[in-house]
Amino acid sequence: MNDAPDGIDQNLLIPGQDLERLRNCQHHAPHDFYGWHAVEGGSVIRTRQIGASKVEVLIHNEELEAHPIGDDIWVLGLSDVYSPGYRLRVTWPSGASTLDADPYHFLPTLGSLDLHLVSEGRHERLWEVLGANVHAYDTVLGSVTGTAFAVWAPNASGVAVVGDFCGWNASQYPMRSLGSSGVWEVFIPGVGAGEAYKFAIQTPEGHRRDKADPLAKATQAPPETASVIVDSRYDWQDGEWIAARAGSNIDTEPMSVYEVHLGSWKVDHGYKELTTELVDYVAEQGFTHVELMPVAEHPFGGSWGYQISGYYAPTARWGSPDELRALIEAFHLRGIGVIVDWVPAHFPKDDWALARFDGPALYEHPDWRRGEQKDWGTYVFDFGRHEVRNFLVANALYWIEEFHIDGLRVDAVASMLYLDYSREEGEWEPNQYGGRENLEAVQFLQEMNATVHNAYSGVLTIAEESTSWPGVTAPTQDGGLGFSLKWNMGWMNDTLEYFKLDPIHREYHHGEVTFSMIYAYSEKFVLPFSHDEVVHGKGSLWGRMPGDDWNKAAGLRALYGYMFSHPGKNLLFMGQEFGQTGEWNEAYSIDWSNLEGWGHEFHTGIQNLVKDLHYVYRSHPALYTQDFDSSGFQWIKGDAATENLLAYVRWGNDGSAVLAVANLSGSTHANYTMGSPRAGQWELVLNTDSHRYAGSGTELDATVATADIGWDGFDQSLNLHIPANSVQWYRWIG
């Protein structure tokens, strides 16, 4: 026992060994000593108030002065043997004082069921029990408002909450360990929204590491790294959208996605400005969805959000969490779905974030052969640990529940699926069967997809998966990964390789532009021209097109006409809708200047085409209702390599038909005959060579009738005028 100051009963003191551990923030049970406790002959109230000049306890309508006993600890002995309601008035040398409830007078904020679910890795609303959550409690002295802090740190020898409210001193608010769960918890009255905080972790080796909250719902703006308490009471007004979403079926609905990096659509715009300008623009252009590159907090802007430090916190670079909610709601009120990029594959090594969170490997796999991604300088999640899977699955649910997002595009899925992904021999360890498949990652992806789809009907999960892994979009009950959609990286690569060729050389590469139809129905595909195609020296899509500006514009228009008539959903990265000339750079706005000055007519023309493509596409079920059914596509001309020509019919599930004709050569095909699967009239509904799009404006017949002449294996045929480097769509009208 400590030597008691004069007049202080030894029973009121803290045993020396415990006091030493408390002093060094290495105690698992500070609540056993701070707060109210029964002792021989009565009870005691103990509190640590670092730097206080006076501490009084308000109890039974009296103000009783506590006594300092060293180490900034104050005690008050009571003759009562039951726990009273009381408040602590703390006076500081400046004369200022505070009056609050005692943090160590409250029961744990996590119940036994919460702890059981956390331990089992099955707590689907993890953000409600871990992190920092503002709470109000009814007590005998009235309501007490404060923040409940909780963090999973099973290897720590001690954890404390630190922040401006305690001078970042880890001795002020140590947390208690809740049994074998690995969770540490404390409720701090009077601390609320807007306060910056971290968790001071004492590692098993005895080092203090101040860590950002893994479940923080807000953060300071980078380069600052503290977490921030937030208490959202957002009043959503998008109930009709959410209700309609539950009954949606993307298989038979139109989908055209505008991929956006929020920081560089216009660099001086945050969530608030984008709520009007970006939403209006996307709606005007006719996109059905917007895909936001990762908006979770990330320390390095040059990672574009793909190296995340705060999985539950929207980045503070562009505004508050509620301002992001308002942006998403604004999209919904205009009939536009919101997809958010999500990165469960890996995370950065910044010392203040998830990396080696409580000393040894925790969120990351402990074996470097599975726990590090050397290409990106990041750690890989330990998918075999159920608490880590819980952290990620709950995070997926969090964005859907708390931000009303309509889909998750999962980044770098291939890096998760293969143990030897981008690894040399000796740098990876086979699975238990000797294979290269990461079975634990497969289980995680199946769990995530099944959980999301069971909880939120109509919400999409989309895999950015660049290999031929089977069953990416097959249901989990059939052994698939369970994604709604998969990016068609093969189509993207083959198509761009073909279109970058001078037309005179294309006949020798015809297979590159037709090969996709061999596997088009093996998965449910999105056709992506994403940010990855316009960075790292690749230039822009405009720059890939051969020839002078006129031909570049014609080539890009033909590319889009082909893309929007090909089976699959569509995605364009921002700037591509008007043929941005420069390579994308996240530090600058996209090239809006392309729409002004010399040559602007080409870019305005492309922008007009994309707008019209969306209108015609969305107006014709043949172009979207059977994207994933082989009966929705029929070749008319798939082998016309010497003419660089493609012709095919898209069939709707209502029997409607659209004929797409693509002349990808540098020469006009006049009086070109091709077969027709139906007799009657075909009406021209789109021509990428129109004057409206800065094309040649060659007059084409508004309708074309079939002739009773067999051609291409059909009983009927059409005779068409097909301008060079252009695409036309015709609908069958009978």
Image (cartoon, grey):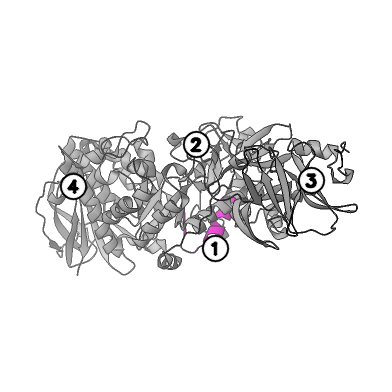
- The front one of 256 and 260 is 260
Q: Earlier in the sequence, mark 1 or mark 2?
A: 2
x and y percentages locating residue 96 in the rendered image: 61, 43
**First reached walking from the N terminus: tag 4 or tag 3:** 3
Q: Are marks 1 and 2 in contact (CB under 8 Å)?
A: no
Q: Are marks 3 and 2 in contact (CB under 8 Å)?
A: no
Mark before the other along the chain sequence, 3 or 2: 3
Q: Which residues are magenta?
A: 444-462
Q: Which mark is residue 605?
A: 4
Query: Can the viewer see residue 642 in this picture?
Result: no
Q: Amino acid at mark 2?
A: Pro
At mark 1, the secondary structure is: helix
**What percent of the width, then of the height, locates residue 326?**
41, 56
Residue hosting label 2? 299
Could you tell me how far apart the alpha carbons at marks 3 and 1 are, in whole angstroms? 53 Å
Please state which amino acid type lies under the numbered disc 1: Asn
Q: Amino acid at mark 4?
A: Gly
Query: For residue 450: magenta?
Result: yes
To which residue does mark 3 refer?
75
Residue 292: x %, y % from top left:
41, 48
